[in-house]
Amino acid sequence: MDQIVANCNSGTTAIERRAKLFRGFADPSRLAILDALCETPLAVHEIVTRTELSQPNVSNHLRCLLECGLVASDRDGRFIRYRISSPRIRALLNDVDALLDVVAESVEACDNYCGE
């Protein structure tokens, strides 16, 4: 019951906050960017090279990831380097991979989330 008690500051429930967080992870482009940033902080052009996404696409998704607090940025001379904002994000992605080792076949067969 505590999980559905409204947060006084934002008016959202804990479950709604979780759902909003997971939407931040729910895009293949954002996941590709996060994977690249798990290795080392990168500038936009380096993320473009590693992910093979377009520069406007990377910039758009970085803005989303920054606003959600999943990445942070630091100035490095004339570049801005982006990095994972918390080691817990790396841990979560590793846990997701471990979970997929167990349920990947069912996830692949699931028709409920095709194309979303």
Image (cartoon, rainbow, N blue to C red):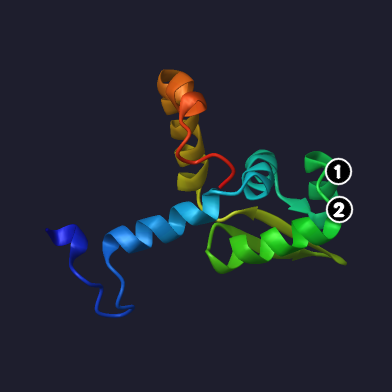
Local SS, label 2: helix
- Circle 2 is placed at which residue position? 45
Q: Rate crowding at label 1 as few (under 14), some (14 to 19) or many (20 or more) other CA atoms within 10 Å.
A: few
Question: How far apart are the two marked residues, 1 and 2, measured between alpha carbons?
Answer: 6 Å
Residue lying at 62% horizontally and 64% vertically, measured from the top left: 64
Q: Nearer the viewer, residue 37 or 104?
A: 104
* Residue projecting furthest to the front: 111
Residue 66 position, x and y percent, is: 61, 65
Residue lying at 28% horizontally and 62% vertically, measured from the top left: 14
* Residue projecting furthest to the left: 1
Which amino acid type is shown beneath numbered disc 2?
Answer: His
Residue 34 position, x and y percent, is: 63, 46
Residue 20 position, x and y percent, is: 43, 60
Query: Viewed as shown, does residue 103 lie left or right of 31?
Result: left
Q: Nearer the viewer, residue 59 or 36?
A: 59
Residue 82 lies in quadrant: bottom right
Residue lying at 48% horizontally and 23% vertically, measured from the top left: 104
Q: Is residue 98 visible?
A: no
Q: Nearer the viewer, residue 61 or 104?
A: 104
Local SS, label 1: helix
Which amino acid type is shown beneath numbered disc 1?
Answer: Thr
- Circle 1 is placed at which residue position? 49
Residue 68 position, x and y percent, is: 53, 64
> Does the CB distance between marks 1 and 2 fall below 8 Å?
yes
> Which of the image's four quarters has the N terminus?
bottom left
Query: Viewed as shown, does residue 115 lie left or right of 43?
Result: left
Up-down relation of residue 29 to residue 110 (above or below): below
